[in-house]
Structure formats: C-alpha cells, structure tokens
Amino acid sequence: MQNSHINGLSGLAYLPDHFDRDAQETLLEEIRKIVAEAPLFQPAMPKTGKPFSVRMSNCGPLGWVADVNGYRYQPNHPETGKPWPAIPARLQALWSEIAPDAPPPEACLINYYSTDAKLGLHQDRDEDMFDAPVVSVSLGDTATFRVGGLNRKDPTKSFRLKSGDVVVLGGDARLAHHGVDRILKGTSTLLKSGGRINLTLRRVTAP
Ligand code: MD3
Ligand code: FE
C-alpha cells in the first residue's frame, strides 16, 4: 500500500520492515526507559468516562491525554505532573527522513495494546495543523487495523501492521478515519509478555 489511494485519498504510505530486529530492540529499550519515567496511564472517553482498553504514555514537549474533560495535548503527565521525557534521537531522525520539510515533531504518543485491547474508528484531529503527517511505528504483536475515509460511514480497508513496520499518513489521508480491530496474539517475540506498542509522531502546533 505504499502511496496507495484509499477511498480516493492520497498520502498513505506503508514502509514494511522499516526497522530490523536489532533496531526494534534498541527502540524498545528506549521506550521502556521513557515509560519508567512517564508511566502508562489509562485514558477515558470524555463525558462518559468509559476507560480505553489501550494504555498510553508520551514523549516530547507535548503529550496527548483523554479524560472526562476532553481530548487535548499538554506538557505534563496527567498523574505525575512531570514534563514528558524527550523524543529519542532515532525517532526524530525517522521524522526528518520521512518529512524533511515539516517542522519537528512535538508529540510521540505511545500506545500499549494488551492482546485484548482495541481502538475504535476515529480521526486524529486534536492537532492545530494537519499539514504535517502522522508517522507510526509498530512494535510487538501484529495488529489488524482499518482505514476508511473522511466520512465516518465511508467504506474501510483492513491491513496488518507487524513489528518494525512504519506507516505515514499525510496529505488527504491525514484526516482519514482509522482504528485497530485486534491484536494477533503470539505473532511476535519482541515483547516478552506479548501485546503491541504503537508510536505515533505528531506535529501539534503551527510553527
Ligand atoms: C493517522 N493509533 O494513536 S497508527 C492513534 O496502531 C492511532 O495504535 C493506531 O490511531 C495504532 O491515534 C494507528 C497508524 C495510523 C493509521 C491510519 C491513520 C495513523 C493514522 C489515518 C489517519 C491519521
Ligand atoms: Fe489515530
């Protein structure tokens, strides 16, 4: 699906096996250090307070959080109150490679999926600008994810994202609906206790 068109949207690029096993292990070590400093928290749906099954943390000057008050980016961890740790250099390098003309990323959202977690169909629209892409890195068990169109009711297509894969959502695809249907248990040995980590690099503010 490299640079493929989905429901007439261009700007979706799939870079399978972008990170080899060695690079995945190094990245995972860096993420472990970040999560030791900025523990995974359980986001909740605004209004209803229904908890997400995905647990999250962030690195970078801003982090995405969700609670009864809404979805937003903020400079501090919602539980510890501390600033988020820095984005690792190799992730900043990935961004510069993929989006050389975009301003630097401000947020790296870390999603952790246990084998029974999922993420419903949604758009990423809490950023102040949509010119920069969202760059995603998958680690651990394979996920089946779904991408639709700008309208929630547009038809969707399913893909598998495996450990080491990178997906870039730019152009028209930046506001496509998407979600994670399920995690395929036992498909990777990267995370000792199974599950999946997804990292998404984002530009939040206009430079
Ligand atoms: C962006 N994460 O954190 S990343 C999210 O695998 C999120 O954890 C998913 O959706 C995950 O907001 C998907 C890859 C992705 C796929 C399609 C997109 C990101 C996208 C379409 C538009 C914008
Ligand atoms: Fe998303």
Image (tube, rainbow, N blue to C red):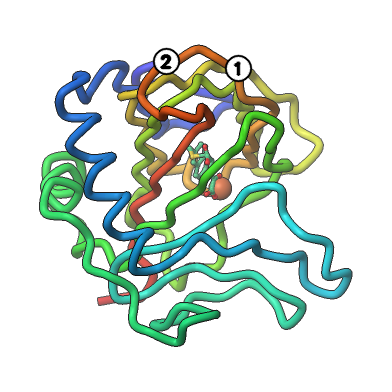
Q: Quadrant of residue 47?
A: bottom right
Left or right: 2 in relation to 50: left
User: How far across and how far down the image is residue 167, in percent?
Assistant: 37, 31
| Image vertical order of residue 25 relative to residue 207, above or below | above
User: How far across and how far down the image is residue 65, in percent?
Assistant: 56, 70
| Image vertical order of residue 191 relative to residue 108, above or below | above
Q: Quadrant of residue 131?
A: bottom left
Asked whether the beta carbons under mark 2 and mark 1 sit within 8 Å of each other, the answer is: no
Q: Quadrant of residue 28?
A: top left
Q: Is mark 2 within 8 Å of ligand 1?
A: no
Tell which residue pokes out farthest to the right in this image: 48
Is disc 2 surrounded by few (<14), some (14 to 19) or many (20+) residues within 10 Å?
few
The image quadrant where one finds the N terminus is top left
User: How far across and how far down the image is residue 166, in percent?
Assistant: 33, 30
Residue at 36% across, 24% down: 190
Is disc 1 surrounded by few (<14), some (14 to 19) or many (20+) residues within 10 Å?
some
Left or right: 165 in relation to 112: left
Of the residues tagged 2 and 1, which is closer to the observer?
Answer: 1
**Of the pair 176 and 138, the residue shown nearer to us:** 138
Q: Residue tagged by mark 1?
A: 184
Which amino acid lies under the numbered mark 2 shown in the image of this protein? Met
Q: If you read the primary sequence from the N terminus, does the residue marked by circle 2 or circle 1 appear first?
A: 2
Residue at 50% across, 68% down: 64
Report the disc number at residue 89.
none
The image quadrant where one finds the C terminus is bottom left
Left or right: 35 in relation to 176: left
Tell which residue pokes out farthest to the bottom in this image: 81
Tag 1 secondary structure? loop
Residue at 62% across, 51% down: 123
Report the disc number at residue 1.
2
